[in-house]
């Protein structure tokens, strides 16, 4: 894609911010959920739950702050929503429930 | 570094709006946070000077506790505090209220042994000045409670989230010019350029500090909610293992000796000295003795010290905030995040560094607001919203600083006269704050900032003057007065406020808004 063809970012604040707030948080949770069960130490490692809790807001806020890089609000919802659907389904499959 | 123009524009918007929404509460949070680094020193400064009652090196704590238990078995069994360093009364317990949370009505009984090893008991209201500074830091002064937390904590939590976005977007919009202009403080290009340069310099230079603060504040505010959410993914696994209560209740008369307990606490890890013990629920199946353990050479997790909780009967270790060695990577990692917020990893130098960083942080928000106002004024000097924001910025920033200084003055004088002064502190803070805000709206931002700064300077210089008057009034106690650094710093700030105010007066032609040590002018 040449620069001329590339779409300009639309600053659709409300749509992107909402997506960042809601879907970003959901995404942060599911990423940490995988980390908690399948990351180093597994689910039972001592004090790991504290680490997991701390990582959720930082993941969330990082995702949130970069949602404005999506071209439009619709794209933000589709991409973040898609990632969420895939990861949550995978988690449900692996764990057989939340 | 090149960044596409549309990305820059987008993030400029993010930066502006997050900053404008969160800036003012964060200003209060930051400068009050600076004060919390020295809140104990400030409280000590405000309390009447007293001759030492006891000598911590010779006090017989065992006899003190035993005698108190003999007189007040019920109240002592509920819990008591034993301070191992103080020269005032070392033992205290609550007859009304409790240690946790903000209770302005707390009544304490304090006890010490006189020269004949006789128990002397006095009743007093617990002094909360240090806690109130902390309260202002954590809530920015918002009243009200949600659940067991102050609502202001949640407001600051949200503000900290916005602040994180403001930091990321601020760095992104700086990227294209960062290498060229980072160290440039361009005075010749006009005041607003100079302000922008210093805003950027401070923001980028202290970026790690700011990222840590933003992130930790979100966690401090919302950890309960985040844990609740996380529990959904843990399935049947409990998040935390609860310690099992003993099968039977203990009796306070079977308490192990204080010395045995101290030896247990000391032998847990070398280098840590116990400075304070809080006993809790002694006639129950789950009693605890929480030791505040100080080790100047180690990173500590609490605001002042590390913690070690033991069962004072079985001497079993219940909980510890110490670094746990290599096999406990997770616990150590989160522990270090706590100390990065509290600034408890660098001794006194660390505290001073955090004090200054906090003030720089406050400056960051203040200058950010001014830059926004400046830009909007240039576009349209008559826009109501811009004038409103200018008044709010000056009113809130100066108002909260004036209010804190007024509270300190009240503390210095009324402690001599009034038994429980905690409610007066709150009232005084809000009255001064809202009067300042009202003045700012009636006088206008420019006049109010000059008058406000002069008042601030006068009030601040009254702090050391009060110390001098009270010191000369009672020369016998003067040798025990230790708060000279507080008086010195207050004088310094007073002079600073005065010079800023004077600078403001020198340039009467142009409109300006000012605070701290910088000036900005609006070109009408």
Image (spheres, rainbow, N blue to C red):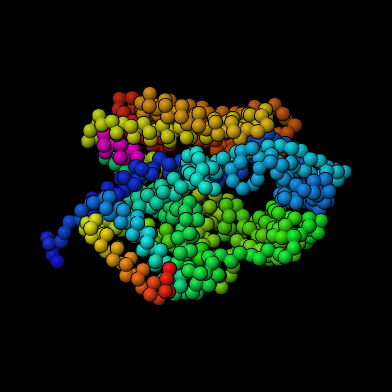
* Quadrant in the picture for residue B267: bottom right
Give the residue at the far left of this rendering. A4
Q: Total label count?
A: 0
Q: Position of residue B493 (x, y in %)?
A: 50, 35
Quadrant where the C terminus of chain B sits is top left
Q: Is residue B34 visible?
A: no
Percent coordinates x, y for residue A32 in the rendering: 42, 67
Quick check: is B76 in the magenta stretch? no
| Residue B200 vertical placement versus B231 (above, below) | above
Residue B79 visible in image: yes
Highlighted magenta segment, given as a residue range: B368-377
Q: What secondary structure prevails in the magenta region?
A: helix
Tell me what residue is drawn at x 79 percent, y 40 percent. Answer: B121
Q: Residue at x 16, y 59 (%)?
A: A7
Q: Foreground residue, B1 or A15?
A: A15
Vertical position of residue B185 compared to residue B245: above or below: above
* Identity of the residue drawn at 62% across and 62% down: B320
Please determine whether, in this image, residue B121 is positioned above or below residue A23: above
Q: Quadrant of the N terminus of chain B?
A: bottom left
Does the magenta portion include B372? yes
In this rendered view, identify the residue nearer to me: B152 or B63. B152
Q: Quadrant of residue B347?
A: bottom right
Q: Nearer the viewer, residue B206 or B484?
A: B206
């Amino acid at each position: 894609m040449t620069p001329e063809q590339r779409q300009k970012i639309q600053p659709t604040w409300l749509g992107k911010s909402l997506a960042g707030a809601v879907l970003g948080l959901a995404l942060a949770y599911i990423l940490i959920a995988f980390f908690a069960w399948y990351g180093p130490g597994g689910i039972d490692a001592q004090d790991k739950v504290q680490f997991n809790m701390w990582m959720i807001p930082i993941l969330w806020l990082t995702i949130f702050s970069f949602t404005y890089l999506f071209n439009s609000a619709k794209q933000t919802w589709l991409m973040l929503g898609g990632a969420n659907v895939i990861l949550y389904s995978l988690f449900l499959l692996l764990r057989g429930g939340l | 570094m090149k960044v596409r123009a549309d990305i820059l524009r987008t993030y400029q918007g993010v930066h502006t709006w997050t900053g404008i929404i969160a800036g003012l509460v964060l200003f209060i949070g930051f400068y009050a946070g600076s004060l919390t680094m020295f809140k104990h020193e400030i409280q000590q400064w405000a309390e009447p000077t007293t001759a030492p009652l006891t000598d911590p090196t010779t006090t017989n704590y065992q006899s003190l506790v035993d005698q108190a238990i003999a007189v007040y078995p019920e109240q002592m069994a509920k819990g008591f505090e034993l301070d191992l360093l103080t020269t005032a009364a070392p033992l205290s317990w609550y007859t009304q209220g409790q240690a946790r949370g903000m209770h302005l009505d707390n009544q304490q009984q304090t006890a010490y042994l006189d020269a004949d090893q006789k128990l002397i008991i006095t009743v007093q209201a617990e002094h909360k000045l240090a806690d109130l500074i902390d309260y202002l830091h954590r809530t920015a002064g918002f009243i009200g409670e949600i659940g067991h937390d102050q609502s202001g904590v949640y407001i600051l939590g949200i503000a900290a989230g916005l602040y994180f976005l403001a930091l990321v977007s601020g760095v992104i919009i700086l990227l294209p010019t960062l290498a060229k202009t980072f160290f440039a403080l361009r005075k010749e290009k006009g005041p607003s350029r100079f302000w922008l340069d210093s805003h950027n310099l401070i923001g980028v230079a202290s970026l790690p500090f700011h990222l840590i603060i933003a992130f930790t504040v979100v966690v401090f505010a919302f950890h309960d909610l985040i844990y609740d959410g996380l529990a959904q993914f843990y399935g049947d696994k409990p998040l935390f293992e609860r310690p099992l209560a003993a099968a039977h209740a203990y009796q306070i008369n079977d308490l192990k000796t204080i010395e045995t307990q101290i030896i247990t606490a000391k032998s847990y890890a070398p280098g840590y000295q116990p400075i304070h013990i809080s006993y809790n629920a002694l006639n129950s199946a789950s009693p605890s003795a929480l030791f505040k353990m100080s080790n100047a050479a180690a990173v500590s997790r609490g605001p002042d010290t590390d913690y070690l909780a033991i069962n004072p009967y079985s001497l079993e270790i219940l909980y510890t905030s110490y670094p746990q060695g290599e096999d406990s990577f997770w616990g150590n990692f989160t522990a270090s995040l706590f100390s990065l917020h509290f600034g408890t990893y660098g001794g006194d130098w660390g505290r001073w560094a955090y004090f200054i960083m906090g003030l720089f942080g406050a400056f960051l928000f203040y200058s950010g607001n001014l830059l926004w106002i400046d830009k909007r004024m240039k576009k349209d000097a008559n826009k109501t919203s811009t004038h409103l924001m200018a008044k709010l910025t000056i009113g809130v920033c100066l108002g909260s600083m004036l209010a804190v200084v007024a509270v300190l003055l009240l503390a210095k004088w009324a402690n001599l006269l009034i038994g429980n002064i905690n409610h007066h502190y709150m009232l005084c803070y809000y009255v001064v704050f809202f009067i300042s805000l009202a003045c700012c709206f009636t006088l206008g931002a420019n006049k109010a900032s000059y008058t406000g700064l002069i008042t601030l300077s006068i009030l601040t210089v009254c702090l050391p003057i009060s110390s001098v008057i009270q010191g000369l009034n009672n020369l016998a106690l003067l040798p025990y007065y230790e708060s000279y650094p507080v008086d010195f710093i207050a004088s310094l700030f007073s002079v600073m406020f005065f010079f800023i105010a004077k600078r403001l007066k020198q340039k009467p032609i142009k409109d300006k808004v000012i605070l701290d040590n910088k000036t900005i002018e609006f070109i009408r």
